[in-house]
Amino acid sequence: MEQLSSQCRKRIIDSQRDAWLRYGYHPNALYWSNEKIQRLRFEMLTLAGIQEGESVLDVGCGFGDFAGYLEDQGKSVRFTGIDLSEELLAEGRRRYPNIELFNGDLFDFDPADASFDHVTLSGALNRNLDDDGAYARKVIRRMYDACREGIAFNLLDARHEWTAGRWDLQSFQPREIETFVAAFARQVELVDGYLENDFSVLAWK
Ligand SMILES: C[S@@+](CC[C@H](N)C(=O)[O-])C[C@H]1O[C@@H](n2cnc3c(N)ncnc32)[C@H](O)[C@@H]1O
């Protein structure tokens, strides 16, 4: 079953290509304002308890920089990244030759249930797909099925007026997402207050 319309998929791929051609290997090519903010989001994902040697599937991995971040923290993991943008992945393969990178979305990749210790996502559900967040919820649920231990992801915070007012961005009420995840996860934790327009959710099996 197709989860992402071909129109949305094309919009994401085209805008990532434009950003890549404009900025090259830089956080701006990922729509992050700077590296500090990119890494702060990564730091929140690691609160899920990713350990040395574990397997991580990162959805919407961009260049695969989360692998580099974990390496910098002294955590060598078995890293698999997936992303819709082949241009970003091609650069990622040059920068991080030891990780596995696949082109597509989570439903193209279709991991078996419980096939990765952790499944993570940073920034890949921030675009308005005109579906009231339905695709994002499907991705989050599928991430949980694919993990053995836990998931960690971030979303834009709808309580932030400027973010919520942007037509091109999809933002969410943190408590609503926490309740959504709590319906299927054994344990869930909301992480808030590290950036004014972003929150993270951690959940475990
Ligand atoms: C804000 S960037 C973040 C990249 C990376 N997670 C990081 O923080 O360095 C979002 C990434 O998600 C990818 N993306 C957007 N929607 C996606 C989807 N449905 N499936 C897979 N990748 C997606 C984009 O191509 C882009 O590389």
Image (cartoon, rainbow, N blue to C red):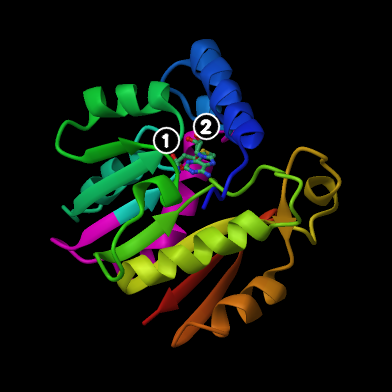
- What's the residue type where badge 2 is placed? Leu
Query: Residue sitting at 63 percent across and 46 percent down?
Result: 126
Marks 2 and 1, how far apart in space?
Answer: 7 Å
Query: On the image, numbered disc 1 is attached to which residue?
Result: 62
Does mark 1 have its CB less than 8 Å from ligand 1? yes
**Callout 1 secondary element:** loop
The reply to whether residue 192 is visible in this rendering is yes
Query: Residue sitting at 22 percent across and 32 percent down?
Result: 96
Q: Residues within 10 Å of mark 2 (few under 14, many from 20)?
A: many
Which numbered disc, 2 or 1, marks the residue that appears first in the sequence? 2
**Callout 2 secondary element:** helix
- What's the residue type where badge 1 is placed? Gly
Query: Residue sitting at 46 percent across and 53 percent down?
Result: 121
Residue located farthest toward the bottom when viewing the structure as drawn: 186
The reply to whether residue 48 is visible in this rendering is no
Determine which of the numbered discs, if any, sits on residue 155 in the image.
none
Q: Looking at the picture, how far across and down is residue 13, in whole percent?
A: 54, 27
Q: Looking at the picture, how far across and down is residue 195, in whole percent?
A: 63, 55
Residue range corresponding to the magenta coloring? 32-56
Query: Residue sitting at 27 percent across and 41 percent down?
Result: 68
Image label count: 2
Does mark 2 have its CB less than 8 Å from ligand 1? yes
Query: On the image, numbered disc 2 is attached to which residue?
Result: 30
Left or right of 78 on screen, residue 102 = right
Q: As displayed, is residue 109 above or below residue 185? A: above
